[in-house]
Amino acid sequence: MSWRLAALKNGFQDATAYRIEFLFEVLGSAFVPAAIQWVLWYAMFKIGGAHEIAGMNYSDMVQYTLVSLLFTQIRGGDHDFELQEMIRSGQLSNYLLRPVSVIEFVYIRGMAPKLLIAGVCLGLGTTVGLFFGMSPVRLLGAMVMALIGNVLHYQIGAALSTTAFLWEEAYSFLMVKNMLVSLLSGELIPLNLFPKNMQWMWKITPFYLYVFGPTQYALGHWTHTYFLEQLAWSCVWLVAGWAFIKVTWGLGMSRYLSLGG
Amino acid sequence: MIVEVKNVSRSFRSPKKTEGFTGAMKLLFKPEYSTHEAVKNVSFSLEPGSFNGLIGANGAGKTTLLKILSGLIAPTSGEARVLGFDPFQRPVEFRRKIALVMGQKAQLWWDLPAVDAFDLLRAIYEIPMPVYKERLHTLATLLDVTKHLNTQIRRLSLGERMKMELIGALIHWPNVIFLDEPTIGLDILAAHKLREFLKEFNRREKATIILTSHNMEDIEKLCSRVLIMRTGEIIYDGTAHGLTEKGECRLRVRLMQSPTVEELAQLTGVNASAIAVQAPDTGPDEEDKDENDHKPIFFTIKYDDIVAILQKIMTKFTIINMGIEEPSLENVIQRLFQ
């Protein structure tokens, strides 16, 4: 078994060491944002009396919220925070001396529970989706895009975490990045709710590929051709993300202090 | 030579924080930096299979030197080579052959049983399963932790955890091992067990070991060679035995008068740094008690000079009593640190 598989297994063991905590994390992070969105749509459509917003009615909004839940669960975790803390506290030293890439190792270990969740979401989405006429092929394609989004999210976070080499503490910086991701990935609101003249804001980042893109494809709002085009873009972002990591970590490591001990 | 260090220096720049609110504001808008030289122009080389002790007071530069040698940080100037590699380049082949254990830093995963962590390390170092099983059995038996292998790391005692850290660091059979205070916080029994293990591992596997410790027993019992660091420089490089066998002793005299150290240095010709009044490590034993509070004065001198120095003292002062003490390694090192 290669070290990647072993790291995946180890990461899964670590994530599920406390079962109740694991279940709460999964369920809590899924249902709390969904409940907030539902309250928002209910207020706008049922109490406020709106019929359609940006071409979406109440049923479209609820459908978006439910389907986007599947992909919100797969969006990357907070490994960038873990990396910045490792840099700040000197814990990074533990990983630097192992004969494997630190960035890859941290990602794979952290990815393990997400893969399980992706499998469950795919199964759940396919089963439930059949009753609502959703295509399993579209769901599978959307899941692939969401998984690429997961890698992208980590790449960006890992590169930004290197600011900790420079500033020592980069928590707030990563926090702001996460808020932007929440807004621009489509996990809080469908991105077509953005005013026309502000649509460029989410189109210039890769964040929409995390949740909005997969949801649109799964719901049949994107054609296959458009989806493939976006998938190709996500691959371009992957290469850019890889280069971003190479440069930032190369620069950062020369400043590493390995504090503590 | 397995480790070669030539004129290595390392300095750190850090922001200076002054007291109070003004200090905080200054740090926010106009920070000032100070540079601290942690390692200064250090050179030495180590032979394969040797057990070496690196000692010094806190902040002497020991850990910084270990970090340079293991490749965690680069030297500001000079050159270090370990196993023929430039450590800071950290090539995979180099990382496969070294291990660093920091007594104050956990490397294993807190929430997992040790055996799960070792299994991951086995995959990382590509150790064949039968070899891994044999090594794990050997290490766990030597360290007496077989029954704790399936216990979560965070549920282990400090000593057991340290032993697990050692197993994690050695499971790939490294050629060079850097140990930074491995016995810190351990009780006498656990420290003894760990020392015995390290001795045995070094003897069996011919691994080169560099150990930093504040525990002189670690150094005396394990290290064939000792390097002493003070404020970033190496001030002694030789055997542990050599430190106490330089023909030096401590001459203790109690005088009727109370001369200053400077007066005594001038009178005897002994360097003032080798004269101490009521040495800090000297307990108030029966012999040292004096109803008139005449404090004992200690001269660290060569055996051959005892008579001449006593004669010089007697020309001006009256000796109440005197004695000669063999220096312990701890005393010698304490004096070197000062």
Image: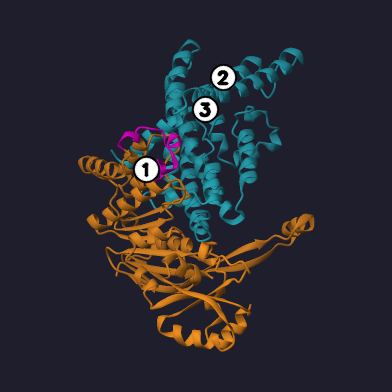
**Pointer 2: what residue?**
A66
Q: What element does badge 2 sit on?
A: helix
Q: Which residue is mark 1?
A: B164
Q: Which residues are magenta?
A: B146-164
- The C terminus of chain B - image quarter: bottom right
Q: Colour of chain B?
A: orange
Name the residue that disc number 3 marks: A73
| Residue A195 magenta-highlighted | no
Question: Quick one: label 1, few (<14), some, or many (20+) residues within 10 Å?
Answer: many
Q: Quadrant of residue B136?
A: top left
Q: CA distance from mark 1 to mark 3?
A: 35 Å
B218 and B162: which is toward the camera: B218
Q: Quadrant of the N terminus of chain B?
A: bottom left
Q: Amino acid at mark 3?
A: Gln
Q: In the displayed structure, would residue B132 be above or below residue B94?
A: above
The total number of labels drawn is 3
- The secondary structure type at the circle numbered 1 is helix
Q: Are the residues flagged by discs 2 and 3 from a single subunit?
A: yes
* Subunit bearing disc 1: B
Q: Where is residue A106 shown, x and y percent of the image?
A: 45, 42
In this view, the residue in front, A152 or B23, is B23
**Residue type pointed to by label 1:** Met
- Which hue is chain A drawn in? cyan
Label 2 and label 3: CA atoms lie apart by 12 Å
